[in-house]
Amino acid sequence: MPVSRRTVLARTAAGSAALATAVTVPGMTAALGTQAAAAPGASGYRIGLGLSDITGPAAECGMMGYSQFEQQTAGIHLRPRARAFIIDSGARRIVFAVAENGMIFQSVHRGVMLELARRFGDLYTEQNVLLTSTHSHATCGGSSNDYAYNLSILGFQQQVYDAEVNGIVEAIAAAHADLGPGTLALGRAELHDASVNRSRVAFERNPDADRQHFPNAIDPAVTALSFVKGGKQVGAITWFATHNTSMTNQNRLISADNKGYASFSYEHTEHGVRYLDGPADFVAAFAQTNAGDMSPNLNLRPGSGPTEDEFDNTRIIGERQYLASKTALAGAQSISGPVDSMLCYIDLADTAVDGRFTPDGQPRHTAPAAAGLSLIAGSVEDGPGLPGLPIPEGVRNPFIDALGDPRQPAPSWLADAQAPKAIVAPLGLLPPVPWVPNVVPIQIVRIGELYLACGGAEFTIVSGLRIRRAVADALGVGLEQVLMQGYANAYHEYVTTPEEYDSQQYEGGSTLFGRYTLPAYQQEFTRLATAFAARQQVPRGPAPRDVSNLQPNFQPAPGPDATPPGRGFGDVLTQPAAAYPPGTRVAAEFVSAHPKHNPRRNGTFLEVQRRNASGVWERVANEGEWAVRFYWSKRGTAESVARFTWDIPADTSSGRYRMRHFADSLGADGVLRPFTGTTDEFDVG
């Protein structure tokens, strides 16, 4: 659903020119990259887990997902992170990495691969590394090289790109350093109160056999993989299909949304992970599957369901996923067997589809990308877009001034190829290069008895089902052994079934390459899975484009910071009260600086500290955790105010507390100067 409701011009910026230069990476041109073998443990596996921060600038950065021009960051709610898992069978190894961001764009995928090659040679390549996204709509945009996803962001944002690439690589490197003997266990459950079909009209057009597979029009499947080392559980991956859109398009706080809360519950609340205290000893990722038409807004209105508060909804839907994971793993069974992977590229703008894969049995063809009218309107259940462009009327967008209005007439041949879509923007034909990627990867990953069919789109539950069937048939395994891993390695919006496409709901209008996009995927996954089963090499396919040198940015950079008259950086504008009981909220405001000067990735803007029996101040909470919120605001043109709140947990120990703020100010001389601010002390108890 990601770019979903957003207008076709969604967001996210582009890849980094520095990392995206043309480089030959060992192992990346072969159908199967070589992998250094490592001696497995007694269980047959060596496993490693790692985690890092991917938070972008907490002020004046367009947010990715809803395509709202005015939705720019203004603080932090729950820091997004990257989590990586490495599984080595002795013969082969795979990397599974989950980023709590909007999408994995090809720019980021390329940047991660280049940096992994620099660090590890041909050990980790595009063949055995899987990158996927939770699809949070409350994180920074600007990491893409695709213009359609940069319009509302005002272009490519280097800070965002760097945060995502570096954070993902750091998580993978931490997992590599953590490799050791371990075991895996797989469990399954169902979750029926964390999703609803937001496109029921389209879903009902599918054949009975498909609809009967999902009697409640949702995919309730919860699949959980447990990681154990030394007899102790050290992590888990949980797959479940629901949009990560509990936070609305009115929100301006960076947040990992409901799947982020699920991870936070597992890691911090249950296992006591302190994210600023070094390597985590427990890592829990909550991955997507085919969530294209699955909404967490159970009342089919943005920010509505189960409650009418977006923060409560984020917590409740996240907690339900966390508890479902626990249920699945309570009955988990040990798994064994090979790990393996295979990837190739396909051109979705120009794929001839055999009649075996089309509804009418006739050969068909995909088409260059085009956005439908319903894409511009957005998904009313999760976050409506704006009519026309993703900017308010009267607001001039310099990105469009530079590249031209995407709403250009479509040639008749493209209109025919995309029918019955009403084309509002021929994205694949726009200058200077197509505004979305058309050469995208597909990948199959095996973890023992579990297979992942990986594609870079938002697949509806029935389109995911059809791909799973195709892969299961080609591999000769049961359908339950195959998951549709969406949001993987690239992003090109939605994939619906041909029947769903005909209704031209939001998801159909966002299926960019035409009515036969899904049949093309079924065909190409069948080809890849057949080769995978036989361990036959497949050609890498057409090369994905690199347009990192064509990335404008029209977001103004912050200048030197200023303070109010008579005030200095770090001064406290609003002090806490003298005392608070547990269960209440503390608030304080500081004279601050623009967060872009130092985003403090893998750090914090605030610590809540408690004085221990020895008189030493110890951190008990920090910004980036659930109970602490950071609100940034600007006064005038150069003054910043940082407001922090702390919801005191009911089990907080009595004692003496204070809050400390950390930031960096930019002087007129161009020098960054760190500063701190400290509130008065207050009692809790």
Image (spheres, rainbow, N blue to C red):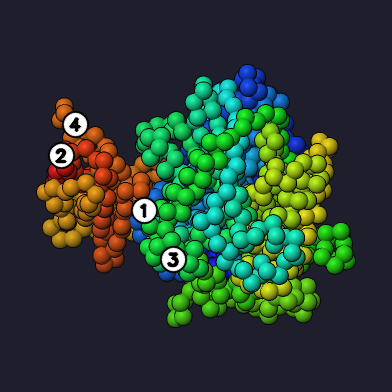
In the picture shown, does residue 299 fall above or below 121? below
SS at badge 1: strand
Indicate the secondary structure of the residue bearing disc 3.
Answer: loop
Q: Amino acid at mark 3?
A: Ser
Residue 166 visible in the current orientation? no
The nearer-to-camera label among 2 and 1 is 2
Spatial distance from mark 2 to mark 3, Cα to Cα?
A: 39 Å
Q: Position of residue 330 (x, y in %)?
A: 53, 36
Q: Nearer the viewer, mark 2 or mark 3?
A: 3
Residue type of the residue flagged with mark 4? Asn
**Which residue position is annotated with label 2?**
656
The percent coordinates of residue 430 (x first, y second) are 67, 70
Inter-mark Cα distance, 2 to 1: 26 Å
Q: Are marks 4 and 1 in contact (CB under 8 Å)?
A: no
Mark toward the start of the polypeptide (2 vs 1): 1
Q: Residues within 10 Å of mark 2 (few under 14, many from 20)?
A: some
Among numbered discs 3 and 4, the one appearing first in the sequence: 3
Q: Amino acid at mark 1?
A: Ile
Identify the residue position indicated by label 4 in the image: 612
Kindly identify which residue carries mark 3. Answer: 304
Q: Which mark is residue 76?
A: 1
Question: Distance of mark 3 from mark 4, alpha carbons?
Answer: 42 Å
Disc 2 marks which amino acid? Arg
Give the secondary structure at mark 2: strand
